[in-house]
Image (cartoon, rainbow, N blue to C red):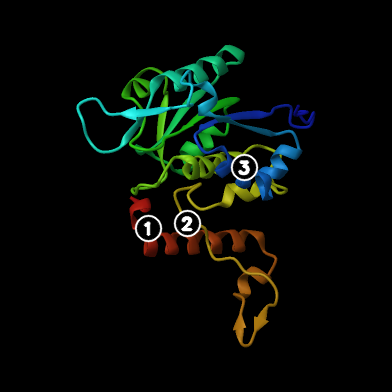
């Protein structure tokens, strides 16, 4: 049982539905997401879809009607899993990870980080029966214009993008405010010690301690970097 920190007074729960539960355990046992769990701010629960099928051989996929290459995830076990979860608590979103979904961006992560409970369905094979998408899914998300073997890695990316934004997860909460894409700009260059490494020097302005000038310098460099690397963002 996760004990919610009184300081932050909320714990987000994310339920992941997958055919490959072992693939998802590693990302959540390390670094920032592990810290979020230990602080009682984020609970990630992994569900093996095969536990919800009525087939004696734990089958969760079948051939396509009409023919064609590739297997399709059946509606029955997915519906059973989602309905059981929804009988236990209310969910803000039921998300399906799919290459043809809405491309994940920072505003989407920001919005989802305000949720209380989320279900994420990881696709596999040729995808899921369309009736799942039509009747159970509230949002479809892609992490890029390419195809992976399944939705597990994209789901881990989404959970990381959301989890780090939960108040109290990052040691310095203001850090997330200056990430790339938060203001439609790429992040400016950053430096640390030593000030001079074999003649490679840190820009003198960020050593002045003048917060106003440093802030303006960072903003200007962010605009320059965005114009050079991602001019589409400036539009």
Q: Quadrant of the N terminus?
A: top right
Q: CA distance from mark 1 to mark 2?
A: 8 Å
Q: Nearer the viewer, residue 48 or 91?
A: 48
Residue 25's disc is 3
Mark 2 or 3 closer to N-term? 3
Q: For mark 1, does the 10 Å Cα neighbourhood hold few (<14), some (14 to 19), or many (20 or more) residues?
A: some
Q: Give the vertical position of 171 relative to 117 (above or below).
A: below
Q: Nearer the viewer, residue 60 or 229?
A: 60
Q: CA distance from mark 1 to mark 3?
A: 34 Å
Q: Which mark is residue 230?
A: 1
Q: Quadrant of residue 205?
A: bottom right
Circle 2 or circle 3, nearest the eye: 3
The residue where tag 2 is placed is 186
Q: Could you tell me if the residues under marks 1 and 3 are in contact, i.e. CB atoms within 8 Å?
A: no
Helix, strand or loop status at disc 2 = loop
Q: Residues within 10 Å of mark 3 (few under 14, many from 20)?
A: some
Residue 231 percent location from the top left of the image: 34, 57
Nearer mark to the viewer, of 1 and 3? 3
| Point 78% across, 31% down: residue | 5
Q: Secondary structure at mark 1?
A: loop
Question: Residue 112, position in %: x, y?
Answer: 52, 32
Tell which residue pokes out farthest to the top in this image: 87
């Amino acid at each position: 049982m996760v004990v919610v920190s009184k300081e932050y007074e909320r714990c987000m729960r994310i339920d992941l539905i997958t055919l490959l539960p072992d693939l998802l355990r590693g990302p959540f046992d390390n670094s920032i997401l592990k810290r979020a769990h230990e602080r009682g701010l984020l609970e990630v629960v992994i569900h093996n879809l095969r536990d919800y099928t009525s087939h004696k051989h734990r089958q969760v996929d079948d051939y396509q009607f009409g023919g064609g290459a590739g297997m399709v995830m059946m509606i029955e076990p997915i519906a059973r899993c989602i309905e059981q979860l929804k009988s236990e608590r209310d969910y803000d979103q039921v998300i399906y990870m799919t290459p043809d979904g809405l491309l994940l961006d920072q505003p989407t992560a920001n919005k989802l980080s305000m949720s209380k409970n989320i279900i994420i369905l990881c696709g596999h094979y040729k995808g899921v029966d369309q009736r799942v998408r039509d009747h159970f899914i509230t949002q479809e998300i892609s992490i890029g214009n390419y195809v992976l073997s399944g939705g597990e890695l994209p789901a881990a990316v989404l959970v990381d993008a959301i989890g780090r934004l939960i108040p109290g997860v990052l040691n310095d909460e203001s850090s997330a405010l200056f990430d790339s894409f938060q203001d439609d700009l790429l992040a400016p260059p950053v430096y640390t010690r030593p000030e001079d490494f074999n003649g490679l020097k840190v820009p003198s302005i960020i050593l002045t301690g003048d917060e106003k000038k440093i802030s303006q310098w960072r903003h200007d460099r962010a605009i320059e970097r965005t114009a050079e690397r991602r001019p589409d963002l400036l539009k």
